[in-house]
Image: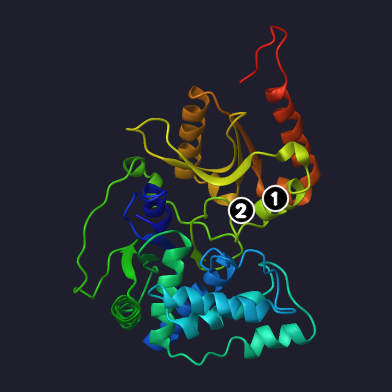
Amino acid sequence: MNADVTALSVEPPPDGAPAILTYFPDAARSVAEMVSTVLRELENAAIDLFPTWLPGAEGIDGPGGAGVRAARALAMRLASTSHHFGPFLADLAELSLAAPPRGTTRSGPEATRFGAEARATRFGAEARAAGLARVLASSFGRREAAILMQVPEGLTPFEEEVFVAGCEWLADRGGFGVWLTGPPLATVDRVEAMTLRVPGEADGLGREAPPLPEGGGPLRYPAVAGIPHPASKAERALEAALASCSWARGRAWNQTYQSHALANPIRVDLLWQEERVVVEIDGHEHRASLKFAADRHRDVQLQLDGYAVLRFTNDQVLTDTEAVAGQVRRFLHGRRTPTFEGSQRV
């Protein structure tokens, strides 16, 4: 069973579960190389998620002026009342402010600072791993973080040993939960194995090759309630278009919805609760059979509960954002307009 299937079966995770990040590694030549690559991707995720892990930093929009000093002060204050390590958190906050938004680049001195100097760290791998585990867990309001690691196909015995040893390092030194999924290990026998069955696997759906995460990187992570997913260009583009529109009031990004107490909770991309309108923005992974079937099941359940579901692809949003926003506006207007009988349409 691949990592996409496993992650889908626990999204959103139950109360008390760790924050779950999914990682698709390549074969590494050494444990140090694997650890370095994973830590770099985890650091990128923490930067993307800023300022969710630093309360009070929401109004700081860049490194200019007093921005860096304010962010570092907030980080040290948070560390004084929590389990975070202050100097690491302050450096990560400064790095986050200097980083360009995902999918963009900086030019001039800022590019040099972010691309070379800002990547240098005065902390060793162990301190970085432990610090990132705490930061990523707190980003999602969880006490711990876990990495769902896809076992690469076709590993040689040496590469398999490196892979497992790297996972053990992340668990022992960083404090991450590390779960392996995918093809079974052929030579390393010290990892406890269990079988997890999810709906659709019996039909072969769980054996599909997992699509790459949006943006081409090996790491994916769940959305944070209340904001567009930082790794989704489409969600960020649509929010930018809606931010100045008075008709878009009442919207909420990435909310968890549960039909009834015994139903599995689901996460919706964009919700207007009062009008009972859900907007979903689909990447290429939604064309895979398991995800497609899960989407149809979600749509039916939402519709039975009185919600309308509008679906757009990433390409639609990115190539003609105004047209997508216009369609949403017209639909919301229809839901808000009283019927001829004088009652509110729902």
**Residue beneath label 2, please?**
228
**Residue beneath label 1, please?**
239
Find residue 317 and name its label: none
Q: How many marks?
A: 2
Residue 144: x and y, percent?
Answer: 35, 65
Vertical relation: 61 (above or below) 79? above
- Between the C-alphas of marks 2 and 1, the distance is 7 Å
Residue sitting at x 66%, y 49%: 314
Residue 12: x and y, percent?
Answer: 42, 48
Residue sitting at x 38%, y 30%: 260
Label 2 Cα crowd, 10 Å radius (few <14 / some 14-19 / many 20+): many
Residue 319: x and y, percent?
Answer: 77, 50
Residue sitting at x 67%, y 83%: 114
In the image, 322: left or right of 201?
right
The quarter of the rendered structure image containing the C terminus is top right
In the image, 214: left or right of 144?
right
The answer to whether residue 29 of the structure is visible from this angle is: no
Tag 2 near tag 1, CB within 8 Å: yes
Give the residue type at disc 1.
Glu
Vertical relation: 204 (above or below) 299? below
Q: Where, by quadrant of the figure, is residue 48 drawn?
A: bottom right
The quarter of the rendered structure image containing the N terminus is bottom left
Residue sitting at x 45%, y 56%: 209
In the image, 215: left or right of 174?
right
Label 1 Cα crowd, 10 Å radius (few <14 / some 14-19 / many 20+): many
Indicate which disc, 2 or 1, sits on the residue closer to the N terminus.
2
Q: Residue furthest top?
A: 341
Give the residue type at disc 2.
Pro
